[in-house]
Image: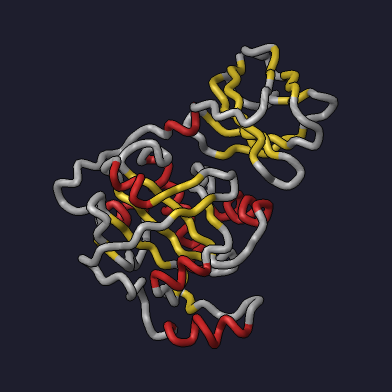
Amino acid sequence: MPTVLPPKRHPLLWMLFVLPHALCAQAYYYPNGSTVADFTVTDTEGDVYNLYDLTAQGKYVFLDFFTLWCVPCQETAPSWAELYQTHGCNGADVVCISLDYENNTAAEVQTYSDTYCGSWAHPPVVTGALPLTAVFGVGNAPNYCLIGPDNVMINNFIWPVASMNDFVAALPAGSGVTPQACAVGVEERTKETLIASPNPTNGTIRITSPSGVSVRVCDALGRYLTTRAIVADQLDLRGHAPGLYVLELFDARAAAVGRLRVVLE
């Protein structure tokens, strides 16, 4: 069962926000069939998402209202991440956005994703989303919902979630949505000038990057494998099978620095 949002850090918010909604089990301010008002959010990597910009492109938008400590959120995180990865990592017909109602740091969100999303690529997370949570009238976590390309709420409470197929089943018949490769996993989105050499490599690679950077090693589909540190500008990839790898670089504040693609021979 979803968890009623309690006053983990903000007792006053419990009285002002959560308590009036404690009996609801969906985003009840937007009943199915109602038009959802436009909104804009920014994730922990600085990427901006505007609902009407997304739907104007014909995209179906899945939202995940959650908290880091919510057990049902943790249990359904792998299915949520699987939906994200198997449907294009927000680069195809489906967009997945996680909305954390607390002001958790990027590092805390990263730890949550690494712990509970398994080997799947991690959907983007927006922290401090309590105002939007209030706009939607969400009183439980997790609360997964689906908005169509016409800005109409298709399903304001997708539950229960036992597998990724429960999300897919929420899509309307004739939507034309099909599984797509995870484009983000192989797309280089560098925020700073990063150089990796030699590339291809036989195991050890030199990376020119800002100091204090750590590296999340992912496979070609964006699935998380491990986290490695850069020591004296050297990254050791020995122990991994030959193939294409995506390196996601983060600074000491867990802010994204950039991505690199390398080939291990």
Find residue 254 and report its horizontal and vertical position in percent: 69, 46
Foreground residue, 244 or 99?
99
Q: Quadrant of residue 13?
A: bottom right
Left or right, residue 93 beside residue 105: left
Residue found 38% across the figure and 46% down from its top: 95
Residue at the right extreme?
232
Quarter that holds the C terminus: top right
Quarter that holds the N terminus: bottom left
Residue found 33% across the figure and 68% down from its top: 157
Q: How is the image coloured?
A: secondary structure
Find residue 108 and report its horizontal and vertical position in percent: 66, 56
Left or right, residue 242 beside residue 180: right
Instruction: Report how many numbered discs are placed on residues in the image.
Output: 0
Residue found 57% across the figure and 63% down from its top: 128
Residue found 48% across the figure and 79% down from its top: 4
Q: Quadrant of residue 242?
A: top right
Find residue 253 and report its horizontal and vertical position in percent: 73, 47
Foreground residue, 96 or 244?
96
Give the answer, above or below, for where 106 lies relative to 158.
above
Left or right, residue 18 beside residue 105: left
Find residue 165 and report its horizontal and vertical position in percent: 31, 53
Residue at the left extreme?
174
Give the answer, above or below, for where 66 lies relative to 117.
below
Foreground residue, 27 or 80?
27
Left or right, residue 154 beside residue 237: left
